Image: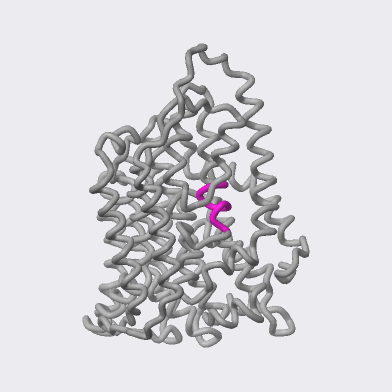
């Protein structure tokens, strides 16, 4: 079911905004209530969308809209995040890994898909250090976000683009220059800060170093199978489709999602329990992400409908903002609007919003409008690092660090530090003419 966005008003966006504001403020303003009832709170906001839809359009159209949000957009997204979380949780790095600036910097050179693998060794390596929170903050910025700019694997916004027809290798081929500049400068800043803090800390007691070893190696093979499943879903196009309550389900996507679930089950079956116990593996981070993002993808249904209405819908002002005087896309506007909204509205649905706003045609956006897609991709991926709710992996890294006793910054403290680190670099990126992507200004 496709809602007529031209007939909707901005009031339909209020539950979406309310949900995301609650996610931002709940852990700080009413922490105990939030952690005990966040699933119910999120469901309440989803109901605030579904009940009015049923009242205005009828129960059947409402059900079709909900099915489209959950099956058409959410399901593949959460299956990938779940599979990577499960498989990564089975890889146990043992031995004496010390959290020196050099070691930390080496771990921070990682991709978003590896965030769940790297975060636990990083926490153990820094267990004896007095200053640890800054390491996790930079890990969220570099590994959970910027490091994912080149691949849809594990990076939610680029994976959404992949599901909508963007070639798997397109980000690596077109965004590597911008990713290298931003990641390199942030990594240099981290090394300087970590060295300064490390010098202030007492030297750790000398002891014999235990050799490093990796357990649960079968999960490394399973990660390779995850990559293969995603790649094959892009190459295999049988043209077989199924209609479920008005939502089109393509055979290659169904096969990929089933393969990913099978890989997760294999990981649970083949990994000894003591390996997950050694990682302090729990289900709570992925449960939290699954519940909150289910509500997000339901609440965003009318928002997407209004965006699809283009100049005839209530978001026509956004089209004006991202269109230059010559009717060509204003790439700087796409970069900053997609980015800033990604920081507060989560970057996966925000990427989809601006992908649709730019026309939603993957062939055009990877061809003559490549600069526009680059601006949307860079904004969503990079600025998802600005807050804990900017990207799904941010949530899980934050939750794992808190479980391990690291006093993480509050939502607004993290926002302040991330903005101080990143915004100057984003302004630099806006004015740098970096071929072959069109200049973002």
Q: Is residue 327 visible?
A: yes
| Observer-nearest of 341 and 280 | 280
Q: Is 90 drawn above or below residue 200 in the view shown? A: below
Q: Quadrant of the N terminus?
A: bottom left
Q: Which residues are magenta?
A: 141-149
Percent x, y of residue 5: 43, 83
Lateral position of residue 178 relative to residue 107, left or right: right
User: Horizontally, is 321 left or right of 261 in the view?
Assistant: right
Q: Residue 293: percent from the left, percent from the top?
A: 36, 60
Residue that appears at 42% across and 63% down: 228
Q: Nearer the viewer, residue 8 or 210?
A: 210
* Residue that protrudes farthest toward the top in the picture: 206
| Residue at the spot 39% in from the left edge and 76% down from the top edge | 302
Please name whichever residue, 379 or 435, is drawn nearer the observer in this view of the structure: 435
State the quadrant of the C terminus.
bottom right
Expressed as whole percent of the image width and height from the top left, the position of residue 357 reads: 54, 78
Count of number-bearing discs: 0
Compared with 400, 341 (above or below) is below
251 to 32, vertically: above or below: below
């Amino acid at each position: 079911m496709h809602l007529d966005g031209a007939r909707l008003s901005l009031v339909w966006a209020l539950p979406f905004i309310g949900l995301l504001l609650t996610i931002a403020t709940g852990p700080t303003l009413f922490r105990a209530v939030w952690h005990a009832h966040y699933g119910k709170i999120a469901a309440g906001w989803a109901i605030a969308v579904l009940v009015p839809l049923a009242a205005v359009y009828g129960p059947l159209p409402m059900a079709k809209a909900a099915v489209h949000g959950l099956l058409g957009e959410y399901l593949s997204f959460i299956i990938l995040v779940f599979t990577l979380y499960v498989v990564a949780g089975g890889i146990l790095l043992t031995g004496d890994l010390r959290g020196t600036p050099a070691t930390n910097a080496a771990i921070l050179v990682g991709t978003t898909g590896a965030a769940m693998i790297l975060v636990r060794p990083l926490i153990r390596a820094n267990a004896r250090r007095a200053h640890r929170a800054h390491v996790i903050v930079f890990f969220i910025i570099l590994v959970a976000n910027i490091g994912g700019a080149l691949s849809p694997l594990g990076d939610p916004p680029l994976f959404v683009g992949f599901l909508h027809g963007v070639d798997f290798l397109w980000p690596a081929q077109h965004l590597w220059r911008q990713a290298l500049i931003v990641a390199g400068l942030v990594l240099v800043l981290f090394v300087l800060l970590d060295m300064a803090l490390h010098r202030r800390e007492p030297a750790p007691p000398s002891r014999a170093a235990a050799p490093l070893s990796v357990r649960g190696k079968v999960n490394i093979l399973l990660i390779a199978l995850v990559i293969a499943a995603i790649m094959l879903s892009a190459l295999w196009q049988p043209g077989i489709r199924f209609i479920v309550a008005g939502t089109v389900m393509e055979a290659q996507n169904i096969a990929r999602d089933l393969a990913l679930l099978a890989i997760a089950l294999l990981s649970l079956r083949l990994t000894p329990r003591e390996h997950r116990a050694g990682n302090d593996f729990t289900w709570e981070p992925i449960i939290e992400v699954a519940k909150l993002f289910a509500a997000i993808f339901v609440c965003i249904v009318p928002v997407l409908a209004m965006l699809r209405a283009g100049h005839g819908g209530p978001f026509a002002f956004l089209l004006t903002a991202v269109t230059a005087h010559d009717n060509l896309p204003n790439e700087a506007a796409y970069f900053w609007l997609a980015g800033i909204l990604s920081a507060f509205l989560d970057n996966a649905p925000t990427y989809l919003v601006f992908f649709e706003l730019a026309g939603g045609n993957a062939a055009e956006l990877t061809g003559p409008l490549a600069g526009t897609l680059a601006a949307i991709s860079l904004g969503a991926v990079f600025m998802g690092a600005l807050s804990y709710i900017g990207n799904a992996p941010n949530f899980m890294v934050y939750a794992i660090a808190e479980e391990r006793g690291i006093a993480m910054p509050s939502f607004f403290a993290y926002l302040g530090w991330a903005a101080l680190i990143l915004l100057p670099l984003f302004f630099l990126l806006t004015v740098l003419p970096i071929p072959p992507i069109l200049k973002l200004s």
